[in-house]
Image: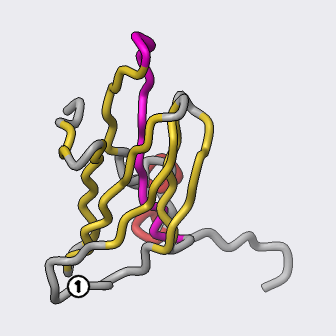
């Protein structure tokens, strides 16, 4: 082939802008008040690492196993407890066939998410 440059067809080229817009799971968030101070709780599953992460005001306060296709056949869901300024909260981890859903509970009450 001596000195000729080979190029790929336009249909074979990688679209770098398409690769850079890969969907990252959106975190589920709650705004909670403890002792008249507002805090933001964020829970996100990182599927490529098979973990879930809990953050309070941007600081990680816990991690939990979150494998793909991990379904629960009972109504007893795993919980991941953590504290904010001495008040106990718990992330309720609800796996299903397509992913996970999370609830945030405090004092036995499920809190309403931000969005």
Residue depicted at x 24% and y 85%: 71
Instruction: Name the residue nearer the viewer: 16 or 32.
Output: 32
Looking at the rendering, which quadrant does residue 45 occupy?
Answer: bottom left
Residue 18 as seen in the image, left or right of residue 55: left
Q: What is the residue that sits farthest to the right in this orientation?
A: 2
Instruction: State whether residue 86 is above or below residue 88.
Output: above
Residue 68 as seen in the image, left or right of residue 2: left
For the N terminus, the quadrant is: bottom right
Write the start and end of the magenta stretch as one range. Answer: 35-48
Residue depicted at x 41% and y 16%: 38
User: For the residue labelled by badge 1, is the local secondary structure a helix, a strand or a loop?
Assistant: loop
Residue 107, given in percent of the width and then of the height, sits at: 28, 43
For the C terminus, the quadrant is: top left
Residue 85, given in percent of the width and then of the height, sits at: 54, 29
Residue 2, given in percent of the width and then of the height, sits at: 85, 81
Instruction: Name the residue nearer the viewer: 48 or 31.
Output: 31
Residue depicted at x 57% and y 54%: 62
Residue 28, given in percent of the width and then of the height, sits at: 32, 44
User: Mark 1 highlights which residue?
Assistant: 72
Looking at the rendering, which quadrant does residue 93 occupy?
Answer: bottom left
Q: How many marks?
A: 1
Type of secondary structure dominating the magenta stretch: strand
Residue 14 as seen in the image, left or right of residue 109: right
């Amino acid at each position: 082939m001596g000195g000729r440059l080979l190029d790929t067809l336009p249909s074979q080229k990688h679209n770098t802008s398409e690769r850079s817009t890969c969907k990252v799971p959106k975190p589920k968030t709650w705004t909670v008040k403890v002792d008249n101070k507002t805090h933001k709780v964020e829970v996100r599953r990182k599927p490529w690492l098979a973990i879930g992460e809990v953050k309070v005001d941007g600081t990680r306060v816990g991690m939990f196993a979150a494998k793909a296709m991990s379904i629960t056949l009972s109504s007893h869901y795993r919980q991941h407890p953590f504290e904010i300024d001495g008040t106990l909260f718990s992330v309720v981890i609800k796996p299903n066939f397509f992913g996970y859903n999370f609830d945030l509970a405090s004092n036995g009450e499920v809190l309403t998410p931000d969005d």
